[in-house]
Image (tube, grey):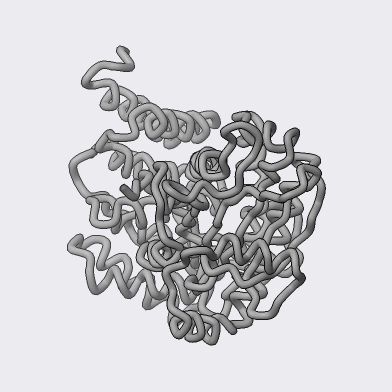
Protein backbone atom coordinates (compact mmCIF):
# COMPACT_ATOMS: atom_id res chain seq x y z
CA UNK A 1 0.00 0.00 0.00
CA UNK A 2 1.32 3.40 -0.99
CA UNK A 3 0.87 5.56 2.14
CA UNK A 4 0.77 8.65 -0.07
CA UNK A 5 -1.61 7.23 -2.65
CA UNK A 6 -5.08 8.60 -3.32
CA UNK A 7 -6.69 5.43 -1.95
CA UNK A 8 -4.37 4.99 1.02
CA UNK A 9 -7.02 5.97 3.55
CA UNK A 10 -9.49 3.57 1.90
CA UNK A 11 -6.99 0.76 2.33
CA UNK A 12 -6.26 1.65 5.94
CA UNK A 13 -9.96 1.78 6.75
CA UNK A 14 -10.41 -1.61 5.11
CA UNK A 15 -7.60 -3.05 7.24
CA UNK A 16 -9.18 -1.68 10.42
CA UNK A 17 -12.59 -2.98 9.32
CA UNK A 18 -11.15 -6.43 8.76
CA UNK A 19 -9.91 -6.53 12.33
CA UNK A 20 -13.38 -5.58 13.55
CA UNK A 21 -14.76 -8.49 11.54
CA UNK A 22 -12.15 -10.72 13.18
CA UNK A 23 -13.56 -9.89 16.60
CA UNK A 24 -16.64 -11.92 15.69
CA UNK A 25 -14.49 -14.99 15.02
CA UNK A 26 -13.10 -14.87 18.54
CA UNK A 27 -9.63 -13.63 17.62
CA UNK A 28 -8.31 -12.38 20.96
CA UNK A 29 -5.84 -10.02 19.29
CA UNK A 30 -8.44 -8.46 17.00
CA UNK A 31 -9.72 -5.71 19.33
CA UNK A 32 -6.27 -4.27 19.96
CA UNK A 33 -5.30 -4.64 16.31
CA UNK A 34 -8.46 -2.81 15.29
CA UNK A 35 -7.73 -0.02 17.76
CA UNK A 36 -4.21 0.41 16.43
CA UNK A 37 -5.43 0.38 12.82
CA UNK A 38 -8.06 3.04 13.44
CA UNK A 39 -5.57 5.16 15.38
CA UNK A 40 -3.13 4.91 12.48
CA UNK A 41 -5.83 6.07 10.08
CA UNK A 42 -6.60 9.11 12.22
CA UNK A 43 -2.94 9.91 12.70
CA UNK A 44 -1.84 9.39 9.09
CA UNK A 45 -4.86 10.74 7.25
CA UNK A 46 -6.39 13.46 9.47
CA UNK A 47 -8.38 14.90 6.53
CA UNK A 48 -9.89 11.60 5.46
CA UNK A 49 -13.68 11.35 5.37
CA UNK A 50 -13.25 8.11 7.31
CA UNK A 51 -11.95 9.87 10.43
CA UNK A 52 -15.36 10.35 12.11
CA UNK A 53 -16.13 6.67 11.64
CA UNK A 54 -12.67 5.73 12.87
CA UNK A 55 -13.33 7.56 16.14
CA UNK A 56 -16.74 5.90 16.40
CA UNK A 57 -15.34 2.41 15.92
CA UNK A 58 -12.51 3.12 18.30
CA UNK A 59 -15.24 3.78 20.84
CA UNK A 60 -16.94 0.51 20.00
CA UNK A 61 -13.66 -1.39 20.33
CA UNK A 62 -12.81 0.22 23.65
CA UNK A 63 -16.31 -0.57 24.91
CA UNK A 64 -15.87 -4.18 23.84
CA UNK A 65 -12.70 -4.60 25.90
CA UNK A 66 -14.34 -2.87 28.87
CA UNK A 67 -12.50 0.45 28.69
CA UNK A 68 -15.54 2.71 29.04
CA UNK A 69 -13.45 5.77 29.79
CA UNK A 70 -11.68 5.60 26.42
CA UNK A 71 -14.95 4.73 24.73
CA UNK A 72 -16.54 7.91 26.08
CA UNK A 73 -13.58 9.92 24.85
CA UNK A 74 -14.00 8.65 21.29
CA UNK A 75 -17.78 9.12 21.18
CA UNK A 76 -17.44 12.65 22.49
CA UNK A 77 -14.88 13.44 19.80
CA UNK A 78 -17.49 12.53 17.21
CA UNK A 79 -20.21 14.40 19.09
CA UNK A 80 -18.13 17.58 19.34
CA UNK A 81 -15.87 17.67 16.31
CA UNK A 82 -18.12 15.95 13.81
CA UNK A 83 -21.56 17.00 14.96
CA UNK A 84 -23.95 16.56 12.06
CA UNK A 85 -21.91 13.85 10.35
CA UNK A 86 -23.60 10.64 9.29
CA UNK A 87 -22.11 8.81 12.26
CA UNK A 88 -22.78 11.40 14.95
CA UNK A 89 -26.17 10.05 16.04
CA UNK A 90 -24.77 6.54 16.34
CA UNK A 91 -21.96 7.89 18.50
CA UNK A 92 -24.45 9.73 20.72
CA UNK A 93 -26.49 6.57 21.14
CA UNK A 94 -23.42 4.59 22.17
CA UNK A 95 -22.36 7.41 24.48
CA UNK A 96 -25.74 7.24 26.21
CA UNK A 97 -25.32 3.50 26.67
CA UNK A 98 -21.90 3.90 28.27
CA UNK A 99 -23.28 6.60 30.56
CA UNK A 100 -25.97 4.16 31.67
CA UNK A 101 -23.39 1.48 32.42
CA UNK A 102 -21.42 3.96 34.47
CA UNK A 103 -24.45 5.22 36.37
CA UNK A 104 -24.69 8.67 34.77
CA UNK A 105 -28.44 8.39 34.30
CA UNK A 106 -29.19 12.10 33.87
CA UNK A 107 -26.64 12.46 31.09
CA UNK A 108 -27.94 9.34 29.39
CA UNK A 109 -31.53 10.58 29.56
CA UNK A 110 -30.51 13.89 28.01
CA UNK A 111 -28.84 12.15 25.08
CA UNK A 112 -31.74 9.74 24.57
CA UNK A 113 -34.23 12.60 24.58
CA UNK A 114 -32.17 14.59 22.09
CA UNK A 115 -31.93 11.60 19.77
CA UNK A 116 -35.66 10.90 19.86
CA UNK A 117 -36.36 14.52 18.95
CA UNK A 118 -33.64 15.26 16.41
CA UNK A 119 -32.32 12.09 14.75
CA UNK A 120 -33.43 11.41 11.20
CA UNK A 121 -32.41 7.76 11.50
CA UNK A 122 -35.53 5.76 12.33
CA UNK A 123 -33.54 2.87 13.80
CA UNK A 124 -31.71 5.14 16.20
CA UNK A 125 -34.94 6.89 17.23
CA UNK A 126 -36.56 3.53 17.98
CA UNK A 127 -33.52 2.34 19.96
CA UNK A 128 -33.27 5.58 21.93
CA UNK A 129 -37.00 5.55 22.69
CA UNK A 130 -36.99 1.96 23.91
CA UNK A 131 -33.85 2.35 26.00
CA UNK A 132 -35.08 5.60 27.52
CA UNK A 133 -38.35 3.92 28.48
CA UNK A 134 -36.46 1.02 30.04
CA UNK A 135 -34.15 3.38 31.87
CA UNK A 136 -37.07 5.23 33.42
CA UNK A 137 -39.01 2.13 34.42
CA UNK A 138 -36.10 -0.14 35.39
CA UNK A 139 -33.17 2.03 36.54
CA UNK A 140 -29.70 0.55 36.07
CA UNK A 141 -30.98 -2.48 34.21
CA UNK A 142 -29.83 -1.73 30.69
CA UNK A 143 -27.35 -4.28 29.41
CA UNK A 144 -24.86 -4.10 26.62
CA UNK A 145 -24.47 -6.37 23.67
CA UNK A 146 -20.88 -6.89 22.45
CA UNK A 147 -19.56 -5.04 19.47
CA UNK A 148 -19.22 -8.32 17.60
CA UNK A 149 -22.90 -8.12 16.72
CA UNK A 150 -22.31 -5.17 14.40
CA UNK A 151 -19.04 -5.66 12.47
CA UNK A 152 -20.79 -5.77 9.14
CA UNK A 153 -21.66 -2.09 9.49
CA UNK A 154 -18.12 -0.85 9.81
CA UNK A 155 -17.42 -1.34 6.10
CA UNK A 156 -20.46 0.62 5.00
CA UNK A 157 -18.67 3.94 4.88
CA UNK A 158 -21.41 5.86 3.17
CA UNK A 159 -24.42 4.69 5.20
CA UNK A 160 -25.55 5.48 8.73
CA UNK A 161 -24.93 2.80 11.33
CA UNK A 162 -28.10 1.59 13.05
CA UNK A 163 -27.23 -0.11 16.34
CA UNK A 164 -29.97 -2.22 17.88
CA UNK A 165 -31.20 -1.77 21.44
CA UNK A 166 -28.96 -3.45 23.98
CA UNK A 167 -29.95 -5.76 26.78
CA UNK A 168 -27.89 -6.65 29.78
CA UNK A 169 -27.31 -7.64 33.38
CA UNK A 170 -27.93 -5.19 36.21
CA UNK A 171 -25.24 -2.62 36.89
CA UNK A 172 -24.12 -2.76 40.53
CA UNK A 173 -24.93 0.44 42.34
CA UNK A 174 -21.40 0.43 43.72
CA UNK A 175 -19.94 0.62 40.22
CA UNK A 176 -16.93 2.91 40.30
CA UNK A 177 -17.54 6.02 38.19
CA UNK A 178 -15.18 6.99 35.41
CA UNK A 179 -13.56 9.64 37.56
CA UNK A 180 -14.11 11.58 40.78
CA UNK A 181 -17.13 13.85 41.01
CA UNK A 182 -17.28 16.75 38.61
CA UNK A 183 -15.90 20.10 39.67
CA UNK A 184 -19.37 21.44 38.94
CA UNK A 185 -21.06 18.22 39.87
CA UNK A 186 -24.40 19.86 40.62
CA UNK A 187 -24.76 20.57 36.92
CA UNK A 188 -22.89 17.60 35.50
CA UNK A 189 -20.52 19.87 33.57
CA UNK A 190 -17.14 18.62 32.37
CA UNK A 191 -14.02 19.94 30.70
CA UNK A 192 -14.33 19.97 26.94
CA UNK A 193 -12.68 23.03 25.40
CA UNK A 194 -9.44 24.57 26.66
CA UNK A 195 -8.35 28.06 25.61
CA UNK A 196 -4.66 28.90 25.82
CA UNK A 197 -3.73 32.55 25.94
CA UNK A 198 -0.09 33.31 25.03
CA UNK A 199 0.61 36.57 26.82
CA UNK A 200 1.53 39.86 25.12
CA UNK A 201 2.39 39.89 21.39
CA UNK A 202 2.90 42.42 18.63
CA UNK A 203 3.79 45.85 19.99
CA UNK A 204 3.74 44.42 23.53
CA UNK A 205 6.97 42.48 24.02
CA UNK A 206 6.32 41.61 27.65
CA UNK A 207 9.28 41.00 29.94
CA UNK A 208 12.74 41.38 28.41
CA UNK A 209 15.89 39.39 28.93
CA UNK A 210 19.50 39.40 27.83
CA UNK A 211 20.08 40.33 24.21
CA UNK A 212 16.86 40.16 22.21
CA UNK A 213 15.04 37.82 24.57
CA UNK A 214 11.34 38.70 24.67
CA UNK A 215 8.54 37.17 26.68
CA UNK A 216 6.03 37.29 23.82
CA UNK A 217 8.03 34.88 21.64
CA UNK A 218 8.80 32.46 24.45
CA UNK A 219 5.23 32.13 25.67
CA UNK A 220 3.89 31.68 22.13
CA UNK A 221 6.27 28.78 21.57
CA UNK A 222 5.35 27.19 24.91
CA UNK A 223 1.66 27.65 24.15
CA UNK A 224 2.00 25.97 20.76
CA UNK A 225 3.66 22.98 22.40
CA UNK A 226 0.98 22.88 25.08
CA UNK A 227 -1.69 22.96 22.39
CA UNK A 228 -0.04 19.99 20.70
CA UNK A 229 0.18 17.98 23.92
CA UNK A 230 -3.43 18.65 24.91
CA UNK A 231 -4.76 18.01 21.40
CA UNK A 232 -3.04 14.63 21.38
CA UNK A 233 -4.84 13.85 24.61
CA UNK A 234 -8.16 14.51 22.88
CA UNK A 235 -9.07 17.99 24.07
CA UNK A 236 -10.46 20.77 21.92
CA UNK A 237 -7.70 23.37 22.18
CA UNK A 238 -7.89 26.95 20.92
CA UNK A 239 -5.38 29.79 21.19
CA UNK A 240 -6.14 33.49 21.50
CA UNK A 241 -3.21 34.15 19.20
CA UNK A 242 -0.91 31.94 17.16
CA UNK A 243 1.11 34.71 15.55
CA UNK A 244 3.09 37.70 16.80
CA UNK A 245 0.21 40.12 17.10
CA UNK A 246 -1.18 42.33 19.81
CA UNK A 247 -4.55 41.43 21.34
CA UNK A 248 -6.11 43.58 24.07
CA UNK A 249 -6.81 41.73 27.31
CA UNK A 250 -10.50 42.43 26.88
CA UNK A 251 -10.56 40.53 23.58
CA UNK A 252 -8.72 37.54 25.04
CA UNK A 253 -11.42 36.82 27.58
CA UNK A 254 -14.09 37.55 24.98
CA UNK A 255 -12.47 34.91 22.77
CA UNK A 256 -12.71 32.36 25.58
CA UNK A 257 -16.35 33.21 26.19
CA UNK A 258 -17.21 33.14 22.50
CA UNK A 259 -15.74 29.67 22.10
CA UNK A 260 -17.38 28.40 25.30
CA UNK A 261 -14.13 27.52 27.00
CA UNK A 262 -14.22 25.17 29.98
CA UNK A 263 -10.71 26.08 31.14
CA UNK A 264 -8.63 29.20 30.47
CA UNK A 265 -4.82 29.22 30.71
CA UNK A 266 -2.83 32.41 30.28
CA UNK A 267 0.85 31.65 29.67
CA UNK A 268 3.50 34.20 30.65
CA UNK A 269 7.17 34.55 31.60
CA UNK A 270 8.28 36.75 34.45
CA UNK A 271 10.63 39.68 34.62
CA UNK A 272 12.48 41.43 37.42
CA UNK A 273 14.78 44.40 37.89
CA UNK A 274 17.14 41.98 39.61
CA UNK A 275 18.76 39.32 37.39
CA UNK A 276 18.69 37.01 40.41
CA UNK A 277 14.91 36.60 40.31
CA UNK A 278 13.96 33.06 39.25
CA UNK A 279 11.35 30.36 39.61
CA UNK A 280 7.80 29.46 38.61
CA UNK A 281 4.56 30.75 40.08
CA UNK A 282 0.91 30.23 39.17
CA UNK A 283 -1.87 32.72 39.80
CA UNK A 284 -5.61 32.53 40.13
CA UNK A 285 -7.99 35.46 40.31
CA UNK A 286 -8.96 37.11 43.55
CA UNK A 287 -10.51 40.50 44.30
CA UNK A 288 -8.39 40.72 47.43
CA UNK A 289 -4.75 41.63 47.30
CA UNK A 290 -2.17 38.94 47.99
CA UNK A 291 1.09 40.85 48.45
CA UNK A 292 2.97 43.81 47.03
CA UNK A 293 4.94 41.69 44.55
CA UNK A 294 1.76 40.11 43.21
CA UNK A 295 0.17 43.53 42.86
CA UNK A 296 3.16 44.75 40.85
CA UNK A 297 3.03 41.76 38.51
CA UNK A 298 -0.73 42.15 38.04
CA UNK A 299 -0.30 45.85 37.30
CA UNK A 300 2.27 45.07 34.61
CA UNK A 301 0.13 42.35 33.01
CA UNK A 302 -3.01 44.52 33.19
CA UNK A 303 -1.55 47.39 31.18
CA UNK A 304 -3.81 48.52 28.31
CA UNK A 305 -6.56 46.14 29.37
CA UNK A 306 -9.24 47.90 27.32
CA UNK A 307 -11.67 48.02 30.26
CA UNK A 308 -13.13 51.18 31.69
CA UNK A 309 -13.22 51.65 35.46
CA UNK A 310 -16.96 51.11 35.49
CA UNK A 311 -16.66 47.90 33.47
CA UNK A 312 -14.00 46.61 35.82
CA UNK A 313 -16.16 47.30 38.83
CA UNK A 314 -19.00 45.33 37.25
CA UNK A 315 -16.70 42.45 36.40
CA UNK A 316 -15.16 42.36 39.84
CA UNK A 317 -18.59 42.05 41.37
CA UNK A 318 -19.37 39.23 38.99
CA UNK A 319 -16.31 37.16 39.82
CA UNK A 320 -17.30 36.51 43.39
CA UNK A 321 -18.37 33.02 42.47
CA UNK A 322 -17.07 30.59 45.05
CA UNK A 323 -17.01 27.58 42.75
CA UNK A 324 -14.91 29.34 40.11
CA UNK A 325 -12.47 30.74 42.64
CA UNK A 326 -11.95 27.42 44.41
CA UNK A 327 -11.66 25.49 41.16
CA UNK A 328 -9.16 28.00 39.80
CA UNK A 329 -7.11 27.73 42.98
CA UNK A 330 -7.11 23.95 42.73
CA UNK A 331 -6.17 24.05 39.05
CA UNK A 332 -3.32 26.44 39.89
CA UNK A 333 -2.04 24.12 42.62
CA UNK A 334 -1.94 21.09 40.34
CA UNK A 335 -0.20 22.98 37.55
CA UNK A 336 2.32 24.56 39.91
CA UNK A 337 3.15 21.24 41.51
CA UNK A 338 3.60 19.50 38.15
CA UNK A 339 5.79 22.32 36.80
CA UNK A 340 8.12 22.38 39.80
CA UNK A 341 8.47 18.59 39.80
CA UNK A 342 9.18 18.46 36.07
CA UNK A 343 11.60 21.37 35.79
CA UNK A 344 13.29 21.50 39.17
CA UNK A 345 12.76 25.27 39.14
CA UNK A 346 12.34 27.33 42.29
CA UNK A 347 8.82 26.97 43.64
CA UNK A 348 7.47 30.49 44.08
CA UNK A 349 4.07 29.09 44.99
CA UNK A 350 0.43 29.54 44.08
CA UNK A 351 -0.75 33.13 44.48
CA UNK A 352 -3.78 35.25 43.78
CA UNK A 353 -4.06 38.72 42.30
CA UNK A 354 -6.35 40.90 40.21
CA UNK A 355 -5.34 39.86 36.71
CA UNK A 356 -7.66 41.44 34.18
CA UNK A 357 -7.14 38.60 31.71
CA UNK A 358 -8.73 36.26 34.26
CA UNK A 359 -11.63 38.51 35.22
CA UNK A 360 -13.79 38.15 32.13
CA UNK A 361 -14.01 34.36 32.26
CA UNK A 362 -16.62 32.42 34.19
CA UNK A 363 -14.70 29.14 34.21
CA UNK A 364 -11.59 27.95 36.07
CA UNK A 365 -8.76 30.21 34.91
CA UNK A 366 -5.10 30.57 35.84
CA UNK A 367 -2.09 32.60 34.79
CA UNK A 368 1.22 30.74 34.71
CA UNK A 369 4.53 32.57 35.03
CA UNK A 370 6.82 29.92 33.56
CA UNK A 371 10.10 31.48 34.64
CA UNK A 372 12.15 34.69 34.55
CA UNK A 373 13.40 35.90 31.18
CA UNK A 374 15.39 38.50 33.12
CA UNK A 375 17.45 35.76 34.76
CA UNK A 376 20.38 34.93 32.42
CA UNK A 377 20.32 31.21 33.17
CA UNK A 378 16.58 30.68 33.39
CA UNK A 379 15.92 32.99 30.46
CA UNK A 380 18.18 30.94 28.23
CA UNK A 381 16.53 27.69 29.31
CA UNK A 382 13.15 29.15 28.42
CA UNK A 383 14.26 29.55 24.80
CA UNK A 384 15.15 25.88 24.30
CA UNK A 385 12.54 23.59 22.68
CA UNK A 386 13.28 20.76 25.12
CA UNK A 387 12.62 22.91 28.18
CA UNK A 388 9.54 24.46 26.60
CA UNK A 389 8.16 21.00 25.89
CA UNK A 390 8.88 19.99 29.48
CA UNK A 391 6.86 22.97 30.68
CA UNK A 392 4.01 22.21 28.28
CA UNK A 393 3.87 18.57 29.32
CA UNK A 394 3.85 19.51 33.01
CA UNK A 395 1.00 21.99 32.55
CA UNK A 396 -0.98 19.29 30.75
CA UNK A 397 -0.30 16.89 33.61
CA UNK A 398 -1.56 19.47 36.08
CA UNK A 399 -4.76 19.83 34.07
CA UNK A 400 -5.22 16.07 33.98
CA UNK A 401 -4.82 15.84 37.76
CA UNK A 402 -7.27 18.67 38.23
CA UNK A 403 -9.80 16.84 36.08
CA UNK A 404 -9.31 13.58 37.94
CA UNK A 405 -7.78 11.76 34.98
CA UNK A 406 -4.77 10.41 36.88
CA UNK A 407 -4.59 7.86 39.65
CA UNK A 408 -3.40 10.54 42.06
CA UNK A 409 -6.43 12.04 43.78
CA UNK A 410 -6.86 15.82 43.42
CA UNK A 411 -6.65 18.05 46.47
CA UNK A 412 -10.41 18.37 46.18
CA UNK A 413 -12.39 15.91 44.14
CA UNK A 414 -12.00 16.90 40.54
CA UNK A 415 -13.87 16.50 37.35
CA UNK A 416 -15.07 13.67 35.22
CA UNK A 417 -13.58 15.15 32.08
CA UNK A 418 -15.65 15.39 28.99
CA UNK A 419 -13.04 15.18 26.33
CA UNK A 420 -13.18 15.97 22.72
CA UNK A 421 -10.87 16.75 19.85
CA UNK A 422 -11.14 19.32 17.17
CA UNK A 423 -8.89 20.47 14.41
CA UNK A 424 -6.94 23.42 15.70
CA UNK A 425 -8.72 26.69 15.02
CA UNK A 426 -6.45 29.56 14.21
CA UNK A 427 -7.40 33.01 15.34
CA UNK A 428 -5.99 35.25 12.62
Q: Position of residue 217 (x, y in %)?
A: 52, 39
Q: Position of residue 4 (x, y in %)?
A: 29, 16
Pick the residue in front: 407 or 36: 407
Is residue 170 found left or right of 129 in the rendered image?
A: right
Q: Residue furthest top?
A: 2
Pick the residue in front: 241 or 228: 241
Total labels: the figure holds 0
**x 53%, y 29%: residue:** 29
Q: Position of residue 312 (x, y in %)?
A: 49, 80
Residue 146 visible here: no
Is residue 116 found left or right of 417 in the rendered image?
A: left
Residue 26 visible here: yes
**x 69%, y 45%: residue:** 371
**x 28%, y 37%: residue:** 50
Viewport quadrant of the N terminus: top left
Pick the residue in front: 109 or 142: 109
Q: In the image, is residue 103 above or below residue 15?
A: below
Is residue 344 found left or right of 90 in the rendered image?
A: right
Pick the residue in front: 315 or 330: 315
- In which quarter of the view is residue 158 placed? top left
**x 44%, y 33%: residue:** 39
Q: Position of residue 93 (x, y in %)?
A: 36, 61
Amino acid sequence: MNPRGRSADDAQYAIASSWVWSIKTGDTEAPQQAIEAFQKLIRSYPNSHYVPRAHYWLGRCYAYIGDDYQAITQYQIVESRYAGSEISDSARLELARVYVRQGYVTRAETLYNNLTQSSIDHGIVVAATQELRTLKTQPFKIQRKPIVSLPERVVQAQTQSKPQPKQASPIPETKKPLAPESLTRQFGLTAKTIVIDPGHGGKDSGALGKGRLQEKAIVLSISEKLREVLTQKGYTVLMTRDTNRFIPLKERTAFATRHKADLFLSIHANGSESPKGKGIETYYLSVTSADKASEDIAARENADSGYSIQELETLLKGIIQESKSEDSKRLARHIQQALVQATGAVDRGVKHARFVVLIGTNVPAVLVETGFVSNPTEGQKLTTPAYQHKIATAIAQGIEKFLGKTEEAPLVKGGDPKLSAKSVERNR
